[in-house]
Image: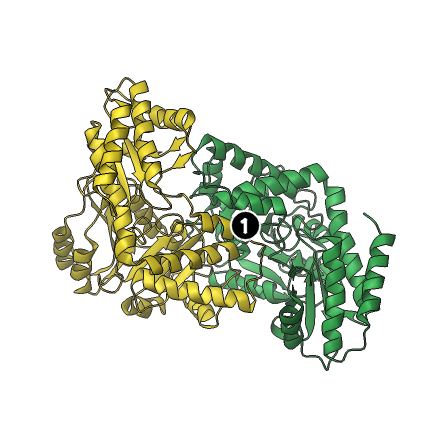
Chain colours: A green, B yellow
Amino acid sequence: MSNPILLAPGPVQLHPEVQKILAHPMIHHRTPEFDQILSHALSGLKFLFQTKQPVLMHTSTGSGAMESALVNLLNPGDEVLAIVSGKFGERWAEMAEIFGGKVSRLNVAWGSGVHAEDVRTYLKNNPQIKIVMTQACETSTATVHDIKLLGEIVSETEALLLVDGITAVGAYPMPMDAYKIDALIAGSQKGIMLPTGLSFICLSEKAWAKAQTAKTPRYYFDLRKELKANQNGETLFSSPVPLVKSLEYVLSMIQKTGFDLHFKEIKRRADFTRAIGQKMGLTLYSKSPSDSVTAFNLPADIKGVELRAHLEKKYFVTVMGGQDQAKGKILRLGHMGYILDADMINTMELLALALADFNFNVNPADVRRMSEAWLKENPL
Amino acid sequence: MSNPILLAPGPVQLHPEVQKILAHPMIHHRTPEFDQILSHALSGLKFLFQTKQPVLMHTSTGSGAMESALVNLLNPGDEVLAIVSGKFGERWAEMAEIFGGKVSRLNVAWGSGVHAEDVRTYLKNNPQIKIVMTQACETSTATVHDIKLLGEIVSETEALLLVDGITAVGAYPMPMDAYKIDALIAGSQKGIMLPTGLSFICLSEKAWAKAQTAKTPRYYFDLRKELKANQNGETLFSSPVPLVKSLEYVLSMIQKTGFDLHFKEIKRRADFTRAIGQKMGLTLYSKSPSDSVTAFNLPADIKGVELRAHLEKKYFVTVMGGQDQAKGKILRLGHMGYILDADMINTMELLALALADFNFNVNPADVRRMSEAWLKENPL
């Protein structure tokens, strides 16, 4: 039996070196040693976001950064266009309403990318829109939107483009400045390959101008205060030391590897998973699939919740099922984090075994052979 | 040379077992394995807070829980009495203003506990006060307030008593229900002996009634949503798995040890530090000293910022200096976390060496002998 495997779209498997760093004796966040680590991590984040702007961090989950973007950039009563294509789009739209936004939803069928020209038309007809919000990758559907095109469209208006890059940043290219994004957020337990607990946010100059005066009350997520603290070499509140140390490690590792190879590694996992899954007889759920996570439709007679639990209990492989309207109908496999070829091969074989237990017509030994062959034919 | 020593009032030295747990391979937070860990941790928190009410957690620093208490319990325009006796009291008062509270400050001299009868009088003359806020221990001054008496006083009124127990819960008795506290908050990196990254909050029935209807907008810190998620066996957002696993370990360790012995251990460290520090010729800064942290006045001719840096750089001992009006004037030594007798002896000797380097009249070898003798005469 192989080791347990975690191939979820976050949290992800940790690099062994990160596990070691997490176990280090504690140091205080007000020490010269930590000051240097924080400084490296903050400049590494600018590299990761491909931006000239400062990238700030919160001790929170990704949802905290989603809230941060809103409380720093929204005035109560502002009109907001929310692209809603899954669970996380719905969450962000709901948040914007709670903080006083007048939200119009551009609903996109689950599993589809938004038709960016619809956004152009909407903004032309509704020039009063102050904020456009979208996921880069909607985690619940494993689907990407065309952020580059959305950036071109929104940047021609007065509106700000807020992008939830939680399942994108670090997993595939998402250059903040080149794509003309006004607020880009990320979370630690996805493409940044750490445990849950840190979130990140970066604002454009256009967004900073609004953040200075926006009237939504804010303290914990106040980016003006956080920026000032960073300029003094600190975070605004106590730093989560083990996470920041690990962050520095991961960012320097990505810098050393280089974006090309780093993203190629993740894309290869996505390509592999899609190829083998389809050879097994599964179909892709998303019409605009992400390199960070792949969703497969399950055969109608297989209950997804039971299959996922069975795969975990009998074969020690954790992947995710569907959420809300996709609950029980899909399986989602993540491609981020520390993943060996052996993990991918074992996952596909064990998934085949689990499917066979549910009377799906698949030959696990064939799946292993196909998997090994694919990886050999498609080296890094 | 001994190992580096961290005796700050948070973050604290970690138990070796916690270091191991932090290094475990990642598991997903939506698994039966994690469900059980979370369930144990949540019930352990009720034990720690000595309450029948649910204790909820946020992925945030302690300041996040300070904000949580306010956004869940404050209506814009509510009158608030803020007991301000140091930096953290000032922070909380400022937060309450930002979220729309009409804040009156009861200023207490730094280093003194509040005169609780002043609060009684104030509430008698100002029955419109909706919230009274105080630190249990003001970390910046190492000073405790009489929360039991404040609880008696405030519970006789319509107001809610909000207590920042960040440097108290887990360090000395702070029984939520018996003290009639309406909102008690804690942070992970102090008496709970974990890295920074989790905060905790517990509301009384009286507070829950207000939380259901309070009009301050909230999402990330919405305790109604968090409670519902907990009742479904989850946290509202992605759980920071390594911290929750470590939390479960620490709480079960405290339960096994028992409160009496656990608190006695910490009190012994405080008693030791005060006794030896005074024998060395230092004086106590606080008139109402805490068992969680001790602050010493420094001789007027010693620059505290330099002494602290010297102690760290030359002797590898990290303690904290003063903040704001006490900056450069005091040293603060923490008593929480995983601390061996050897750490305490070494700290006092190394502090003496550092003081001697600054021409303070002290004999480090004598300090070591006194320290060893004190601990032998005062066993656990």
Residue A262 at least partly seen: yes
> Tag 1, which secondary structure?
loop
Question: Would residue B158 be found to the left or right of residue A208 on screen?
Answer: left
**Furthest residue to the bottom?**
A301
With respect to residue A78, does B319 lie above or below? above
Label 1: chain? B
* Horizontal relation, residue B155 to residue A370: left or right: left
Q: Residue at x 60, y 60 (%)?
A: A81
Q: Is residue B235 visible?
A: no
Q: Of residues A331 and A116, which is closer to you in this image? A: A331
> Residue B8 at what x, y percent from top left?
36, 39
- Give the camera-side residue of B325 and B201: B201
Kind of residue sitting beneath label 1: Ala
Q: Is residue B49 left or right of residue A207?
A: left
User: Height in image: B354 above or below A79?
Assistant: above
* Residue drawn 56% across the image and 38% down it: A42
Q: Quadrant of residue A248?
A: top right
Q: Is residue A256 above or below residue B256?
A: above
Question: Which residue position is annotated with label 1?
Answer: B23
Image quadrant where residue B377 sits: top left
Residue A101 lies, with reference to residue B206, above or below; the image says above
- Measured from the top left, where is residue B271 in percent x and y? 22, 41
Number of numbered discs visible in the structure rendering: 1
| Location of residue B268 in the rendering, given as x and y in whole percent from the top left corner | 25, 45
* Residue A260 location (% of width, % of height): 76, 43
